[in-house]
Image: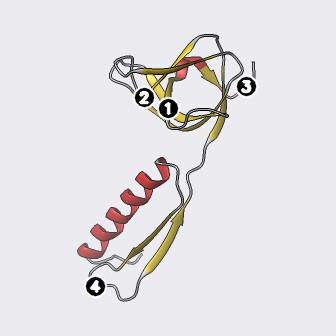
Amino acid sequence: MRIMPRPARLASRAAAVVLTMAAVAGGTVTATAAPAGVSGQHQVQAKAHTIPNFVQYNGVNVRTGPGVQYPRVDIVYRGQGFNVYFCSNGHDNRKWCLGDLWGGRTRVWIAQDYINTFRP
């Protein structure tokens, strides 16, 4: 096992965080880094992956953030496709998923209780 010097480890972790954040944002990212103590530059590309889901009920609220305290921007109905980037706990102790509606809004949140990978 090769142990990297501390500055290189920190730079590597920072690059991983940046790439993860960019992947969550849904874009393809090209990052160039030259950590201290490492010669040359490294190029990495990351593409965010989504998981197709479907709304399971009628009249489901679509929000700008992960919780009921965020504004509703749309209402969707059973069968609506929703590509999920990731899910996380909201401030209301529910799980919320960030994704893109098929043929509609992008980067919106839906409570996980209302979506599933199975088409209704």
Label 4 secondary element: loop
At horizontal 61% and vertical 22% (from top left) the residue drawn is 115
Q: Position of residue 28 (x, y in %)?
A: 54, 60
Distance Cα–Cα, label 3 vs label 4: 50 Å
At horizontal 53% and vertical 67% (from top left) the residue drawn is 45
Q: Position of residue 65 (x, y in %)?
A: 40, 29
* Residue on which disc 4 sits: 37
Distance Cα–Cα, label 1 vs label 4: 41 Å
- Which dot, 4 or 2, sits closer to the camera? 2
* Residue on which disc 2 sits: 64
Label 2 secondary element: loop
On screen, residue 89 versus residue 111, left or right, reads: left
Label 1 secondary element: strand
| Residue 118 badge | 3
Distance Cα–Cα, label 4 vs label 2: 42 Å
Taking the view exactly as shown, the residue that stands out farthest to the right is 119
At horizontal 72% and vertical 21% (from top left) the residue drawn is 79
Other-residue count near label 3 (Cα within 10 Å), few / some / many at <14 / 14–19 / ≥20: few
Which mark is first along the chain, 4 or 1? 4
Query: Please, what is the three-letter code of the amino acid marked with disc 3?
Result: Phe
42 is higher (above) or lower (below) than 63: below
Which mark is first along the chain, 4 or 3? 4
Which mark is first along the chain, 3 or 2? 2
Query: Please, what is the three-letter code of the amino acid marked with disc 4?
Result: Gly
Label 3 secondary element: loop
Query: Please, what is the three-letter code of the amino acid marked with disc 2?
Result: Thr
| Residue 15 badge | none
28 is higher (above) or lower (below) than 107: below
Which mark is first along the chain, 2 or 4? 4
| Residue 108 badge | 1
